[in-house]
Amino acid sequence: MTEAQKTKILARLVKRLSEDWDADLMSQLVDDAEDWVLAYTNRTVTTDSLLRTIGDLAIISLNRLGTEGDSSRSEAGESYTFDEAPAYIFKILNKYRLARAGGHAYETVTDEDD
């Protein structure tokens, strides 16, 4: 991911968060989300069309801090279940997923990807 792309994601996230956010933590969550998206889609380059999804995954990760490893939780009469990622994330990513043939995913890099 380019610095411009990362800055764009972080700027969007800042608008959604309170002023009490940790820049280093958010940067790490964005990097982790990008790594997960690239691995899932079999890509090596982040496209602009994946930036929103990466940002959404970073926010989901932030909201789930402290519940890592939990599949469900009950507190004060409320129950929560956790999925790996929401279904809408997979629906979006499946559109950008590259098929693997012979152990290799063939990716065409365009000017948009640079």
Image (cartoon, grey):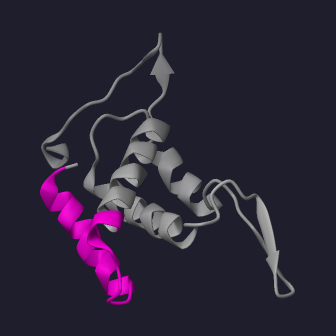
Question: Where is residue 82 drawn, in percent x and y?
Answer: 71, 63
- Tell me which residue sits at (31%, 29%) in the image: 107
> Is 109 drawn above or below residue 62 in the view shown?
above
Residue 79: image quadrant is bottom right
> Is 96 drawn above or below residue 13 in the view shown?
above
- Tell me which residue sits at (28%, 65%) in the image: 24
- Tell me which residue sits at (52%, 46%) in the image: 94
Residue 6 on the magenta segment: yes
> Is 26 drawn above or below residue 1 in the view shown?
below
Q: In this view, which residue lies farthest toward the right?
A: 77
Front-lying residue, 1 or 31: 31
Residue 11 on the magenta segment: yes
Front-lying residue, 23 or 45: 23
Q: How many marks?
A: 0
- Tell me which residue sits at (32%, 89%) in the image: 19
Q: Is residue 87 left or right of residue 52?
A: right
From the image, give the main secondary structure of the stretch colored magenta: helix
Question: Where is residue 86 drawn, in percent x and y?
Answer: 62, 62
Q: Is residue 108 left or right of residue 77?
A: left
Q: In this view, which residue lies farthest toward the top?
A: 102
Question: Where is residue 87 drawn, in percent x and y?
Answer: 64, 59
Magenta-drawn segment:
2-25
Residue 43: image quadrant is top left
Quadrant where the C terminus is found in the figure: top left
Question: Where is residue 48 drawn, in percent x and y?
Answer: 26, 56
